[in-house]
Image (cartoon, rainbow, N blue to C red):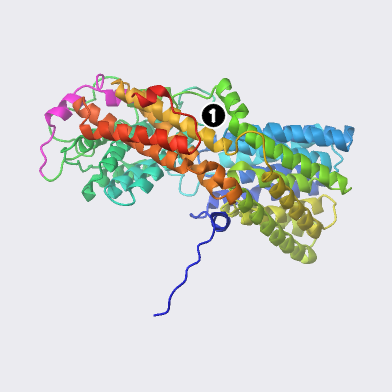
């Protein structure tokens, strides 16, 4: 037989070829088509092309941040970067009009330092920093007749128009319910589906991946339900019901994680209950009879109790009574339409009767009520914590790199005496954006996407009528952005076509070939600056996120071993630990796909993250066992001791600081 040779590509190249998958977000496609194109058309008809260019730019950048999720989350995700972009336009316009090349470059470099440091806080802050710098470059380098404050207003109007579309247009198929909460409904249903998948994968090789998927689903639902609001608490019955259903999923996720940790395969019927609950969330219909698992081990007993609590929550429609369960006794058979014992299992054993006899003393119900009512985060974001992140190792590293790349590209662009020099620093901003992947991957995709987009636009510009053909091209490109965001090269190509069409409508000549040259120059600048030696230790963002994950795991383990009966606090600590771990893992994966000269600075951190994940999983198993028996088995204590020892050794090999002393003595 012929020998088959396989070539293993290096990580930095495989990342550049990787693309996200999923169904086409048709609602986002419709919003994209109705955003920049119609705004530009209205401005052209009014004879204010430059105004339309600014509004369309605001809508385009808002479209890049228009991701799946709830409407309230979209307001925050789109609105905050929009405000930052408007501020950048004001600063860039007035600085470009009143300063020479050298002081202007210094101002832009300082903005790069600030925006880069802020980008370390999270995705929304990263988007805000990016729009701040892009808009500042456009304001300083794009010749438009309007003053800076008017440019900012029209830019904000474009972003606000997309937000209005996001709030007003219902998702297809969501009109049967309160369509205002269709994003939250999908997110909560996905949590129950992820729980079912984890239960089905228990004892198999996919259990770890399913647990990570459950973490992602819980994070997404938590963000969807905790978006910005005018009132502190939920003001509608639909939202209260969804918050209660999310809170009811937390003990189910805890029990499923403990069962997966045990490593034993489970009967297929074990996953059926969460699947039916997921369908009930999506349809708004009763969940129907739920198969009850055999109460043979602590994890299954916890799952059984959590299923009963979820069924009661769905029966109440999310209403938290605060007293005894209405019209229901737990010592007899299961209520039809809520939950049903199968295979002849005895209904209501002593443990279940004692646990559920009174919701006022039931820690499961009390914790769910507190979680649904008081909020889904243990600690709200504090100013001091944000400042520590911005000024910490990750913020300093990002800020230094962004400032150097942004300032150097602005200086080179002005030194070349190019009239419209803003493209070079704006391109550099997208290349150094920290959450779009490794440096070389971003550079390769940006270069390929720009070349493709410029060639496509040159072909269309040669045959399309003006300006109507260009306006149609802007609308089509806006519709393609939600699909193109799955790969950075595709997104770059679509955005390049859209921007070139905008600037031509604004009165500039066709500039496809010069844009290619400027993009390649920006790629070279970013590659050189990105690999220069930097003050301090490289990999600061990875180390900072691993330290945050270690602190969160420590807080969770300490709470569980203390024997505290506050379920709401325990679930919040568990969510925070897994969220911090997911953020650390994402940063580690990006760093591992860099060129070897950069990847070596974070060697060994993936082992630390894996140990922390096993530690948090073991802590969850301990919590479930303590609820059931009040004490830990030798397997639990030995596993905790082994993991803590491994954590110390791995952090030392990775060059990280020692973990908290009280964590080692837990």
Check disc 1: other Cα within 10 Å, few if <14, some if 14-19, many if 20+: some
In the visual, does 49 lie left or right of 311? Answer: right
Residue 362 magenta-drawn? yes
Q: Nearer the viewer, residue 78 or 284?
A: 78
Q: Nearer the viewer, residue 19 or 183?
A: 19
Q: Nearer the viewer, residue 419 or 241?
A: 419
Up-down relation of residue 147 to residue 563 (above or below) = below
**Residue 249 pos. (x, y %):** 34, 35
Residue 349 magenta-drawn? yes
The residue under the point 27% across, 31% down is 622
Res 371 seen here: no
In the visual, does 474 lie left or right of 210? Answer: right
Report the quarter where the N terminus lies. bottom left
Magenta segment:
344-367
Res 448 seen here: yes
Report the quarter where the C terminus lies. top left
**Residue 302 pos. (x, y %):** 24, 34
**Residue 332 pos. (x, y %):** 12, 31
The residue under the point 60% across, 48% down is 597
Q: Which residue is mark 1?
A: 228
Secondary structure state at the residue bearing disc 1: loop
């Amino acid at each position: 037989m012929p020998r088959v040779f396989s070539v293993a590509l290096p990580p930095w190249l495989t990342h550049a070829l990787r693309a996200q998958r999923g169904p086409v977000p048709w609602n986002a496609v419709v919003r994209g088509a109705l955003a920049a194109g119609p705004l530009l058309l209205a401005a052209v008809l009014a004879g204010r092309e430059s105004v339309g260019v600014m509004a369309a730019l605001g809508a385009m950048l808002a479209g890049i941040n228009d991701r799946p999720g709830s409407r309230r989350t979209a307001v925050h995700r789109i609105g905050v970067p929009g405000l930052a972009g408007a501020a950048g336009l004001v600063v860039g316009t007035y600085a470009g009009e009143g300063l020479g090349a050298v002081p202007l470059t210094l101002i832009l470099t300082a903005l790069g330092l600030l925006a880069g440091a802020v980008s370390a806080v999270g995705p929304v802050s990263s988007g805000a920093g990016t729009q701040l710098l892009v808009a500042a470059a456009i304001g300083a380098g794009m010749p438009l007749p309007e003053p800076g404050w008017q440019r900012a207003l029209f830019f904000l109007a474009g972003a606000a128009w997309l937000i209005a579309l996001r709030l007003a247009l219902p998702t297809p198929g969501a009109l049967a319910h309160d369509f205002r909460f269709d994003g939250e409904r999908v997110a909560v249903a996905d949590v129950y589906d992820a729980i079912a998948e984890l239960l089905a994968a228990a004892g198999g090789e996919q259990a770890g991946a399913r647990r990570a998927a459950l973490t992602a689903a819980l994070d997404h639902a938590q963000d969807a339900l905790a978006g910005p609001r005018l009132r502190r608490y939920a003001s509608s019955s639909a939202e209260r019901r969804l918050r209660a259903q999310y809170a009811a999923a937390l003990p189910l996720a805890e029990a499923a994680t403990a069962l997966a940790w045990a490593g034993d395969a489970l009967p297929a019927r074990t996953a059926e209950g969460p699947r039916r609950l997921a369908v009930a969330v999506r349809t708004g219909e009763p969940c129907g009879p739920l198969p009850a698992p055999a109460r043979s081990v602590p994890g299954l007993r916890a799952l059984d109790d959590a299923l009963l609590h979820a069924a009661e929550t769905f029966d109440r429609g999310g209403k938290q009574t605060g007293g005894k369960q209405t019209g229901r006794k737990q010592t007899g058979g299961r209520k039809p339409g809520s939950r049903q014992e199968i295979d002849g299992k005895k209904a209501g054993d002593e443990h279940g009767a004692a646990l559920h006899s009174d919701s006022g003393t039931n820690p499961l119900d009390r914790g769910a009520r507190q979680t649904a009512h008081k909020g889904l985060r243990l600690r709200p974001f504090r100013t001091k914590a944000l400042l520590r992140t911005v000024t910490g190792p990750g913020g300093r590293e990002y800020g230094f790199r962004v400032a150097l790349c942004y300032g150097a590209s602005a200086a080179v662009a002005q030194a070349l005496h190019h009239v419209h020099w803003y493209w070079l620093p704006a391109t550099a901003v997208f290349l150094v954006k920290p959450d779009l992947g490794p440096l070389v991957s971003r550079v390769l995709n940006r270069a390929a996407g720009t070349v493709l987009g410029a060639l496509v636009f040159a072909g269309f510009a040669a045959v399309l009528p003006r300006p109507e053909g260009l306006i149609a091209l802007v609308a089509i490109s806006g519709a393609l952005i939600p699909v193109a965001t799955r790969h950075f090269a595709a997104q770059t190509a679509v955005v390049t076509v859209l921007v070139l069409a905008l600037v031509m409508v604004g009165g500039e000549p066709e500039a496809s070939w010069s844009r290619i040259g400027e993009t390649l120059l920006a790629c070279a600048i970013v590659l050189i600056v990105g690999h220069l030696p930097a003050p301090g230790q490289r990999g600061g963002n990875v180390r900072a996120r691993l330290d945050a994950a270690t602190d969160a795991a420590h807080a969770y383990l300490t709470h569980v071993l203390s024997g505290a009966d506050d379920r709401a606090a325990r679930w919040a600590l568990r969510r925070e630990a897994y969220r911090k771990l997911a953020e650390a893992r994402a940063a580690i994966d990006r760093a591992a796909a860099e060129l070897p000269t950069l990847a070596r600075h974070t060697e060994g951190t993936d082992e630390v993250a894996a140990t922390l994940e096993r530690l948090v999983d073991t802590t969850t198993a301990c919590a479930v066992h303590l609820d059931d028996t009040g004490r830990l088995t030798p397997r639990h204590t030995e596993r905790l001791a082994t993991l803590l020892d491994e954590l110390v050794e791995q952090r030392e090999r990775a060059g990280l600081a020692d973990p908290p002393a009280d964590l080692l003595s837990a």
